[in-house]
């Protein structure tokens, strides 16, 4: 079945440093979503990427979708303590048939920001 | 709107006991999902539903059952609890758009 691998599993940064997490799928994706989960909280939707090579920005966050639609990245510029949490990518398969929105989640990257 | 509401928040079960995790949404979403989250493993899909009366298995359905008698409710049933079912369970819903709305989760321990 479809697998989505996410690295790194953990990342510790000093406040003000940049952070990047990478997501790779074993199959071509129809689209990819990113979620953030604060410690003790639930995942919260950040963004969806659909087009090959797409780049989207949300303030200090930059999201990219690879040309082959098999990989994606999330980059945070100048991290802040409020960025702490786990960041998940979640891919929707491009395989034939109706997917019903069944996402395959990566393992997540746990970000710690030291003040 | 309350969004997606899950109860209980915490539960401890003994091996072999049964329980139902409740999930309700007030957004009139057709699609509802149950995920479990284990440390370092991301979220795994247990069951999903595309509308009232329609359910289907996800990636890890063994040991669980669901029903969807109304649009609002999507309970998850554990019949014979096992230690391997110790996890955090999240219910989620969505409309026709891609955005999943998650409940606050149920932390379940099976001892």
Image: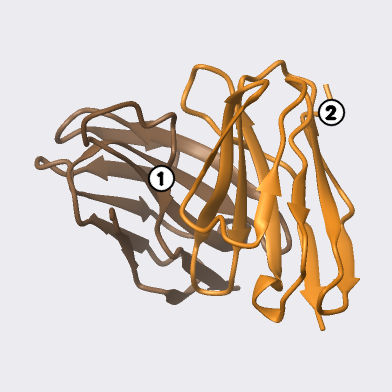
Query: Which residue in the structure is indicated by mark 1?
Result: A61
Tell me which residue sits at (43%, 45%) in the image. Answer: A34
| Residue A88: mark in rendering | none
- Of all residues shown, which one is farthest toward the bottom? B111
Give the color of chain A as drawn.
brown
Q: Viewer-proximal residue, B80 or B31?
A: B80
Tell me which residue sits at (28%, 55%) in the image. Answer: A1
**Quarter containing the N terminus of chain B:** top right
**Quarter containing the C terminus of chain B:** bottom right
- Of all residues shown, which one is farthest toward the left? A68
Which x, y percent locates residue A80? 55, 59
Q: Are the residues flagged by discs 2 and 1 from a single subunit? A: no
Which x, y percent locates residue A54? 21, 32
Label 1 resides on the chain identified as A
Which x, y percent locates residue A66? 16, 44
The answer to which image quadrant residue A82 occupies is: bottom right
| Foreground tag (2 vs 1) | 2
Query: Which residue in the structure is indicated by mark 2?
Result: B2
Q: Which chain is orange?
A: B
Gap in angstroms between the C-alphas marked 2 and 1: 28 Å
């Amino acid at each position: 079945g479809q697998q989505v691998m996410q690295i790194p599993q953990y990342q510790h940064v000093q406040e003000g440093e940049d952070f990047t997490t990478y997501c790779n799928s074993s199959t071509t994706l129809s689209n990819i979503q990113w979620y953030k989960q604060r410690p003790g909280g639930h995942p919260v939707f950040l963004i969806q990427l659909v087009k090959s090579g797409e780049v989207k920005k949300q303030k200090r966050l930059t999201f990219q979708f690879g040309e082959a639609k098999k990989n994606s990245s999330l980059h945070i510029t100048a991290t802040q303590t409020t960025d702490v949490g786990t960041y998940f990518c979640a891919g929707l398969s491009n395989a034939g048939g109706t997917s019903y929105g069944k996402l395959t989640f990566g393992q997540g990257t746990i970000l710690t920001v030291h003040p | 709107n309350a969004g997606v509401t899950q109860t209980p928040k915490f539960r401890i079960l003994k091996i072999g006991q049964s329980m139902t995790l409740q999930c309700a949404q007030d957004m009139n979403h057709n699609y509802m999902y149950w995920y479990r989250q284990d440390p370092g493993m991301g979220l795994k899909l247990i069951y999903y539903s595309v509308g009232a009366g329609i359910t289907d298995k996800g990636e890890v359905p063994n040991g669980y059952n669901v029903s969807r008698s109304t649009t609002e409710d999507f309970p998850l049933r554990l019949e014979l609890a096992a230690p391997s079912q110790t996890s955090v369970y999240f219910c989620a819903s969505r409309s026709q758009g891609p955005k999943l709305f998650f409940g606050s989760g149920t932390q379940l321990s099976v001892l």
